[in-house]
Amino acid sequence: MSGLTEFFSEAFAQTIRALAGQGLHPAGPPYGKYYGMPGATADVEAGLPVDGSVAESGEVRPGSLPGGRVVEAVHVGPYDTMVETYAAVQQFFAAEGWQPAGVMWETYLSDPDEEPDPSAWRTLISWPLAGAHEDGERG
């Protein structure tokens, strides 16, 4: 987990270079797709939405986010406090009697280079319902 910021920084930079080499540009903010709830380690991939098809380039491969019903919450604050928002989302799932899927993603609505105050950072947490057209395949 301590290397997550560096991982995302490098992954997003590689992806932007690969897209530019294909004449493509991001169509929205970057995201991290998690395969299971992060703990001491995280199984995660980094991505940027695009309009169009992306060809594999080095470590950059095309992928997709799951479709179907999704519970979403906006976290405001630094990344290391997102555990609180995740807990609230899990409580919502329990209150509704729903089961969360094994894959979730975070969309980083704030750019730390443009907004240096972590208390103002906004992150959209999206967590699909289990069985709601879940697509956990890596892409």
Image: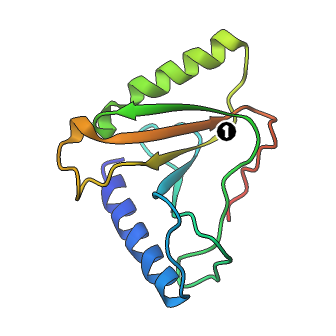
Amino acid marked by disc 1 = Gly
Q: Nearer the viewer, residue 43 or 90?
A: 90
Whether 129 is drawn above or below 103: the answer is above
How crowded is the residue under tag 1: few (<14 C-alpha within 10 Å), some, or many (20+)? some
Q: Position of residue 105 (x, y in %)?
A: 55, 45
Q: Is residue 14 left or right of residue 54?
A: left
Q: Residue at x 67, y 29 (%)?
A: 100
Whether 124 is drawn above or below 129: the answer is below
Q: Is residue 8 left or right of residue 27?
A: left
- Is disc 1 placed on a helix, strand or loop? loop
* Quadrant for the C terminus in the image: bottom right
- Looking at this view, name the residue that lies furthest to the top: 95
Q: Position of residue 41 (x, y in %)?
A: 44, 45
Which residue is disc 1 drawn over?
102
Q: Position of residue 32 (x, y in %)?
A: 49, 53
Q: Is residue 57 left or right of residue 83?
A: right
Q: Residue at x 53, y 87 (%)?
A: 23
